[in-house]
Amino acid sequence: MRIPLHVKILAGAALGAILGGAACAVFQDDPATAANEAAQLEWAVKNIAKPVGDVFLNLLFMLVLPLMFAALVLGISEYKDLRKLGRIGLKTLTYTILVSMVAVFIGITLVNLFRPGDGIPDDIRTKLLESASAEKTAATTGVKSGIDLLVAIVPRNPIKAAAEGDYLAWMFFAVLIGLGICLARTVAAEKFRDVMQGLFDICMRLIGLVIRLAPLGVFALLFKTTAELGWEILWQLAKYVMVVLLALAIHQFVVYPLIIRFVAKRSPLQFFRDIQEAMVTAFSTSSSNATLPTALKVAEENLKLPPQVSRFVLTVGATANQNGTALFEGITVLFLAQFYGVELDLGQQIIVVLMCILGGIGTAGVPSGSLPVIAIICGMVGIPPEGIGMIFGVDRLPDMCRTVLNVTGDLAAAVVVSRGEESHASEINEILQD
């Protein structure tokens, strides 16, 4: 029987944590241990575990730039008929931005309230920062303020910005290209969009191959972390997962019911009954894209939405309306900031919010598709991106739950947008056929 990849990743994470924690307890915490044995552990961490983990992360980071560019261009260009659609497209875009903003603020509020990343001793935190490579550790020096980050959004040279790792400017450039495709609407512009689709498909295929190495990479990264910090890090990861799940639950069972009740004028209880098939599919597949056929079926057969409206909203939403992903990214970035002792001021946290909203638009709707985006945001605000290695090991359950939130948000958006828009169904059908 073939073992699922997520089971292998969990096994690698568990084995790495157990062996690393045991090595820390035996070779570092025991005063009777000979100095040369502790030195052997340090050698193994430095020359085996760290290189293996770094190679895995470097393979992932190598594909982040083209993937993020293509995903954002495609996500924005999904609105290419926005002017022709009129208020239909505008309502979809407005809903996506506002609800994603609410989701991120919920996540950031909870992570600031519970602070799951605190508790690492200063000397160990300093050691972790020093062990990260220079390009990953702007955390201790040269961190830009919120105003500087806002000014740096608009690049003089986007290619230079990409080469220097200024991902915010590169993402802004990608958004402009996506908007340009929306406005141009020429044959050449559509061909360029096809090129972006090809680039996206290639990057996703390559990332799929890299992710197959995740069990080994996560084993090495967690072995390194627990060998340096001990088993205490597992408690912090457990607190992080609990904060993520709490934030997802609040958005799922508080925000969405309020939207359904007061905006869509429907019964929230009946809404959740109608979409339970899509929610189960989302939980089991951890993929918004894989759940799309089920969501379309539920929207038409159970929610009784106009097919033309629901098809447009759900198709766009599978890529561009990922509230759970935006929420998760905000929590994870601030958790890693707390873990590494990187203090983010209000301006920087606002930048994180904006980046997470963009990330919700540009993230691939596939399992763990948000982790490369988190690496980008971390690098921008001075947090060592290698921290996502820890997140890989505990991401399966949060990934399944945030996919449920994403799909629920898409269906809620379809209900909201469909209200009062039946008269425009024929116009939307014409656009979809084009």
Image (spheres, rainbow, N blue to C red):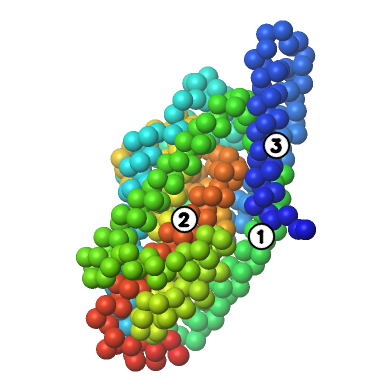
**Label 3 belongs to which residue?**
15
Which kind of residue does numbered mark 1 sit on? Answer: Gly
Mark 2 and mark 3 lie on one chain; the one further toward the N terminus is 3
Tell whether label 3 touches label 2 (CB within 8 Å): no
Q: Residue at x 39, y 85 (%)?
A: 308
Tell whether label 2 touches label 1 (CB within 8 Å): no
What kind of element bears circle 3?
A: helix
**Can you see residue 53?**
no
Instruction: Name the image quarter holding residue 391.
Output: top right
Structural distance between the alpha carbons of marks 1 and 2: 20 Å
**On residue 14, which mark appears?**
none
**Can you see residue 91?**
yes
Of the pair 67 and 15, the residue shown nearer to us = 15
Mark 1 and mark 2 lie on one chain; the one further toward the N terminus is 1
Which kind of residue does numbered mark 2 sit on? Answer: Arg
**Label 2 belongs to which residue?**
402
**On residue 208, which mark appears?**
1
Q: Could you classify mark 1 by the number of other residues whose Cα lies within 10 Å: few (under 14), some (14-19), or many (20 or more)? A: some
Screen quadrant of the N terminus: bottom right
Of the pair 345 and 329, the residue shown nearer to us = 329
Which kind of residue does numbered mark 3 sit on? Answer: Leu
Residue 113 horizontal/vertical position (percent): 34, 36
Q: Nearer the viewer, mark 1 or mark 2?
A: 2
Q: Is residue 404 left or right of residue 110?
A: right
Q: Could you classify mark 2 by the number of other residues whose Cα lies within 10 Å: few (under 14), some (14-19), or many (20 or more)? A: many
Q: Residue at x 64, y 52 (%)?
A: 6
Residue 375 horizontal/vertical position (percent): 53, 47
